[in-house]
């Protein structure tokens, strides 16, 4: 995992109120969050064996 180069914005009391991230790191976090949402949405879908997946890919001409 990459080390983030975050910076914080603090209020008058010294409390952190916001964070500044390099754009590339922010975009990576958004992509990770999207992947987690997709995983959660598909949690209850039936699984497919590796052999079945290979068979389907061969039938579709992708393997």
Image (tube, rainbow, N blue to C red):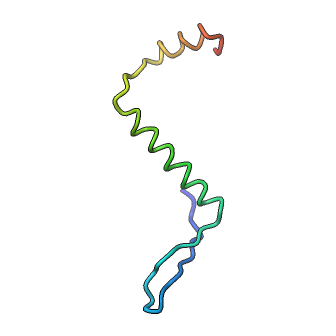
In the rendered image, residue 10, in percent from the top left (x then y), is placed at 50, 84
Q: In the visual, does 32 lie left or right of 27?
A: left
Who's the residue at 59% across and 60% down the image? 26
Q: Quadrant of residue 39?
A: top left
Furthest-bottom residue in this view: 12
Name the residue furthest left: 44
Above or below, comparing residue 34 to residue 22 in the picture: above
Find residue 50 and report its horizontal and vertical position in percent: 47, 18
Residue visible at 64% across and 66% down in the picture? 22
Q: Residue at x 37, y 26 (%)?
A: 45
In which quarter of the view is residue 27 placed?
A: bottom right
Return the residue nearer the eye: 13 or 62. Answer: 13
Q: How many marks?
A: 0
Left-right relation of 8 to 63:
left
User: Residue 2 placed where, x, y %?
Assistant: 57, 59
**In the depicted view, which residue is nearer to us: 19 or 52?**
19
Residue 62 location in percent, x, y?
A: 65, 15
On the image, which quarter does residue 24 sit in?
Answer: bottom right
Instruction: Specify the quadrant that holds the C terminus.
Output: top right
């Amino acid at each position: 995992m990459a080390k983030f180069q975050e910076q914080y914005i603090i209020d008058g009391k010294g409390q952190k109120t916001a964070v500044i991230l390099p754009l590339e790191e922010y975009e990576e976090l958004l992509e990770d969050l999207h992947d987690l949402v997709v995983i959660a949405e598909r949690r209850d879908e039936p699984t497919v064996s590796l052999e079945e997946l290979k068979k389907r890919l061969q039938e579709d001409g992708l393997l």
